[in-house]
Every structure is written in structure tokens, then in C-alpha cells.
Image (cartoon, rainbow, N blue to C red):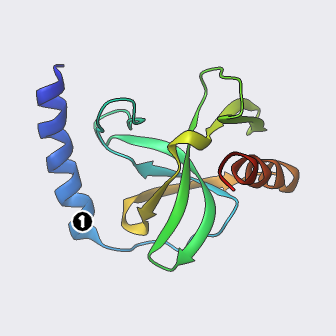
Amino acid sequence: MNTKQEFNDWIEVKIDVNHRGLKFNFSEGEVWWCAIGRNVGVEINGKGKEFVRPVFVLRKLNKRSFMAVPLTSQEHSGAWYVNFRFKNMQEYAALSQVRIVSAARLYRRIGRADEMDVLRIRQGFHDLFL
């Protein structure tokens, strides 16, 4: 599929996401499937027809929004990533891709990260940005 078609497809999904509104309660430390979308340049994209990707809920801002850290299973190293085990798989929290996300983008809760991993991801964010 070409990039122009992907953007057009994402616009259709984005309209649906916007109209469905808030459906879920979420908490810090949880991992969710989230409609990240088709993005620009080096920004991480969602996958599949719904343009979803797992995200880690770093900070709940209110019942409608949160700071999301997109996750990837592709191996990465360096200060921009925190690796951790989640549901018997190696995951990498892409700290450089952190963003504010509407809760309307949430699709399904996958689970909660181990408390030690939650602390490691928070510390990685703090070390990188603060």
C-alpha cells in the first residue's frame, strides 16, 4: 500500500475513533492497544487496518487523556528505549515517541506491566527528559 492510501485509510479510522468517544477507564502502568495512526516522518505508526499499537500508560492526566509511550517488539538499545518482559515477550518502550493521547483512541486493555518495569520506564523517562 502506498503512503497516500495509508493516510486516506487512517483518516477514515480517525473519524470513527473520534465519534465513538470515551469507552474505557485506564490506569498508569497499564498496556493498551491504541489507535496511534499513520504518522509523519520518524513518528511511530500503528499497524493493521485499525492503525493500532500497544502503548504503556505513563501518566494519567485526567479521565480523557494520558501520556502514552508506544511499545515495539523490535530490538532497540540506548537511552531512548527501556526494554522489559511483558506477557512472556520482550518489549521496548520507545521513550522518544512519548505523546499525549486521548482515551478515545483506546481499543483494548492488554494488561499491567510489572511494578519494577513501571518504575524502570518512569525512571528512563525522567533521565531522558527531566
Relative to 53, residue 130 above or below:
below
x and y, in percent, of residue 7 in the image = 17, 36
**Residue drawn where x is 53% and y is 49% of the image:** 98
Residue topped by disc 1 = 18
Secondary-structure class at tag 1:
helix
Within 10 Å of disc 1 (Cα), the crowding (few <14, some 14-19, many 20+) is: few
**In the displayed structure, does residue 109 sit left or right of residue 43?**
right
**Residue drawn where x is 43% and y is 61% of the image:** 101
> Which quadrant of the view contains residue 44?
top left
**Split into 4 quadrants, where in the image is the C terminus?**
bottom right
x and y, in percent, of residue 26 in the image = 58, 70
**In the displayed structure, does residue 88 sit left or right of residue 30?**
right
x and y, in percent, of residue 65 in the image = 46, 71
> Which quadrant of the view contains residue 96?
top right
**Residue closest to the far bottom:** 62
Q: Nearer the viewer, residue 82 or 88?
A: 82
**Residue closest to the far front:** 130
Q: Amino acid at mark 1?
A: Asn
**Residue drawn where x is 39% and y is 36% of the image:** 43
